[in-house]
Image: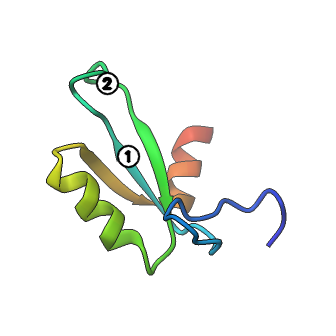
Amino acid sequence: MTDETPICSAKGCRAAAVWVLAWNNPKIHTPERRKTWLACEEHREHLAQFLGVRGFLKDVVLLSQWQASEGA
């Protein structure tokens, strides 16, 4: 890994990110706004459940696909 390698957003995790969890808090964000958390393979489900139970989770995509769509 380099300093530019995206890492997992889970507390204390330093693993390389593989997933992007796009989310939005409807109480404070406009409907089209997307915040993102990054997740390694191990923490993807945990972070998705955390956001999902609050009704915040909008999408889960591979980091490579997210980066490709951002570059398009």
In the picture, residue 16 is in which quadrant? bottom right
How many C-alpha atoms fall within 10 Å of the one at disc 1: few (<14), some, or many (≥20)?
Answer: many
Q: Which comes before the other along the chain, label 2 or label 1? A: 1
Quadrant holding the N terminus? bottom right
In the picture, residue 3 is in which quadrant? bottom right
How many C-alpha atoms fall within 10 Å of the one at disc 2: few (<14), some, or many (≥20)?
Answer: few
Badge 2 marks a residue whose secondary structure is: loop
What residue is disc 2 on?
32
Compared across the picture, whether 69 is left or right of 46 comes to right
Q: Residue at x 31, y 22 (%)?
A: 29
Taking 10 as reference, is 30 above or below it?
above
Q: Residue at x 44, y 81 (%)?
A: 42
Taking 33 as reference, is 23 above or below it?
below
> Label 2 vs label 1: CA separation?
11 Å
User: Which residue is at the far bottom?
Assistant: 42
- The residue type indicated by label 2 comes to Glu
What residue is disc 1 on?
22
In the picture, residue 61 is in which quadrant? bottom left
- The residue type indicated by label 1 comes to Ala
Q: Residue at x 52, y 59 (%)?
A: 9
User: Which residue is at the far front?
Assistant: 12
Q: Residue at x 39, y 70 (%)?
A: 44
Tags 2 and 1 touching, CB below 8 Å: no
Total of numbered circles in the picture? 2
Can residue 13 be seen here? The reply is: yes
